Image (cartoon, coloured by chain):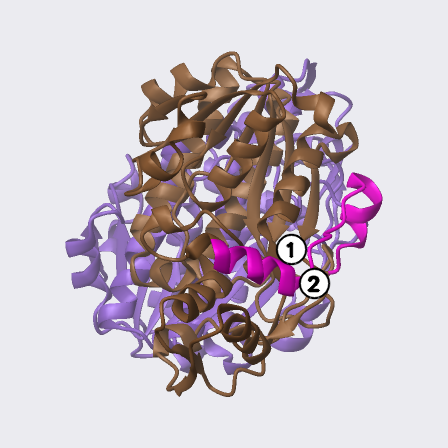
Chain colours: A brown, B purple
């Protein structure tokens, strides 16, 4: 995999976010010529990542700005297309905003590809949320799609955009349906990304971890380095064109177990029970566990980071 | 069914289009209090349908205009939510325009419902195009979704919007995935809606019917009166809430057979072969046939118009 990226011109949209920073740093280590497109420099990132930022190109632009997007997209060989707004509960509160950023923004990127770079390889991170409440576990890629949030409905739409541009214009698109990633390099964003990091961050900073309900629902937490591996393999593997892969740890722990691990590794913190906020209850999907057989077989990918080890490293990064 | 609509306050968005006019006229016959929302009065409609237009309320407004939409949506008991821009090939040429009308417009309608009428019954017409190229025939509702156009990707998104608003706010939503409707009352639109009407219109007006390729691909043509029946049953049937139904004739004829029937019933016209325009070839789905078992069982619906009879009536309407 290393040799696949040496000297390659690679664009990471949303490259200053949690996943984007981790992916971009790895790409630089592998010798890629990295461009990052993001709509702003999150507070703290320029200090924490100065070593890295000095060696890449940075374009600060909104993905809805076609002119700027077009200039960045020309000549790229690979695009990791991470830009967008996350947050399922938020999307249900402000659906038109989610539409504008996540659908109009993505169509702007793809229209730029169609005009200036139609054959580029592109990997789009979708979400396990497209499945809604699982009808069976573990969830494979054939599981029916039943999004419970506008965010997830738009992830589905953008998955389809990528494949439509693939069929019509030759875009080499792969979609990853990602479970719950966690890991270092999130501090710059101001708030923690996802449930696992928010628990770890709370424990490290001595704030209580609030569990809604009994915390018995299982989730599939994926360490960021393993997720980065999946991105790199997906873009490098010709067999992945036009394909969708579930990317998760494939294991699964309850939210309560996760909280207990966070407290144990942080050496402090406490767990408290809280009432379900309505906007979270409405989109709660219950247990989720990824079936990652397809990614194992077709991408040669498998996660290798034990959750204790992953939490330990994340705790260190927050210190 | 008749009694279900007598005195009911019913809104038809897109009510001056082909399906909308047919549906609205029937609703008026059934004694409903009909409001039609459309973005313009198509040329010819005010003359051809004066008898009908005198007895309904008409709101000329863009569905992206939240203030106007809100005023129309309050107090409605049933909404047939037909507004939008059709055309799969067109959507691939101008995807951002399709997004703006079909997704932003629909979210504007649903946001208005959420605020002013969250428990309304609503029927949304989706399309057989969400299935893409069939993997098997006839196509049932469990068939995988693989849209080949931005139009179809957005139909999927809007299907999901309806169900999400159902779960979150109590909207009583039903989705119909419609095959290829045809029938009278299209002249007002200036151009024919769909393949069957364009063939019939060509034959009646003495223009050649142009078949791309050999015309052997089968399609499922549904007479408009049968489609109107399906809409009426879907909104009246409590068991239809949160459900998706394929609505087609369930029979199927090749494009060539359709063209021959059009010529025969028109008593004139000729069929010529043409080269595939690229934008049509790109989205050609091959044979399609609806499995309508679910609609038969749950809605008690079945199409009753033989295609010869349907074409005959359509020919008369174009004369």
- What segment is highlighted magenta in the picture? A291-316
Residue B292's label in the rendered image is: 2
B225 horizontally vs A145: left or right: left
- Secondary structure beneath dot 1 equals loop
At horizontal 73% and vertical 44% (from top left) the residue drawn is B288
- Secondary structure beneath dot 2 equals loop
Where does the image place residue A85, in percent across and percent down from the top left?
38, 47
Mark pair 2, 1: CA separation: 7 Å
Q: Which residue is mark 1?
A: B248
Q: Would residue B197 be visible to someone looking at this image? A: no
At horizontal 43% and vertical 78% (from top left) the residue drawn is A281
Q: Residue B243 or B288: which is nearer the viewer?
A: B243
At horizontal 41% and vertical 63% (from top left) the residue drawn is A201
Q: Would residue B116 be visible to someone looking at this image? A: yes
User: Are the residues tagged 2 and 1 within 8 Å (C-beta)?
Assistant: yes
Where does the image place residue A196, in percent across and percent down from the top left?
51, 64
Where does the image place residue A162, in percent across and percent down from the top left?
57, 34
B256 horizontally vs A166: left or right: right
Q: Residue B38 or A125: which is nearer the viewer?
A: A125
Q: Residue B176 or A156: which is nearer the viewer?
A: A156
């Amino acid at each position: 995999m290393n040799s696949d990226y040496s000297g390659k011109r690679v664009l990471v949209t949303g490259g200053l976010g949690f996943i984007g920073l981790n992916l971009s740093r790895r790409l630089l280590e592998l010798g890629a010529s990295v461009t990052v497109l993001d709509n702003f420099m999150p507070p703290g990132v320029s200090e924490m990542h100065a070593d890295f930022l000095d060696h890449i190109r940075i374009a600060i632009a909104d993905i809805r700005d076609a002119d700027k997007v077009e200039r960045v997209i020309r000549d790229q060989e690979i695009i990791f297309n991470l830009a967008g707004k996350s947050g399922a509960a938020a999307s249900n509160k402000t659906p038109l905003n989610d539409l504008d950023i996540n659908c109009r923004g993505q169509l702007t990127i793809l229209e730029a590809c169609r005009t200036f770079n139609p054959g580029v390889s592109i990997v789009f991170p979708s979400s396990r949320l497209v499945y809604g409440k699982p009808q069976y576990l573990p969830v494979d890629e054939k599981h029916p799609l039943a999004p419970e949030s506008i965010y997830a409905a738009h992830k589905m739409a953008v998955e389809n955009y990528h494949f439509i541009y693939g069929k019509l214009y030759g875009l080499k698109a792969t979609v990853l349906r990602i479970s719950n990633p966690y890991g270092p390099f999130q501090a710059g964003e101001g708030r923690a990304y996802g449930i696992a990091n928010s628990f770890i961050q709370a424990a490290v900073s001595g704030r209580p971890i609030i569990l809604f309900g009994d915390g018995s629902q299982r989730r599939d937490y994926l360490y960021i380095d393993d997720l980065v591996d999946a991105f790199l393999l997906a873009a490098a593997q010709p067999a992945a064109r036009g394909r969708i892969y579930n990317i998760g740890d494939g294991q699964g722990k309850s939210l309560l177990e996760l909280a207990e691990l966070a407290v144990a590794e942080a050496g402090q913190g406490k767990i408290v029970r809280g009432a379900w906020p309505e906007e979270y209850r409405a989109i709660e999907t219950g247990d989720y566990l990824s079936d990652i057989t397809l990614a194992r077989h077709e991408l040669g990918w498998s996660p290798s980071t034990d959750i204790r080890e992953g939490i330990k490293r994340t705790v260190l990064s927050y210190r």
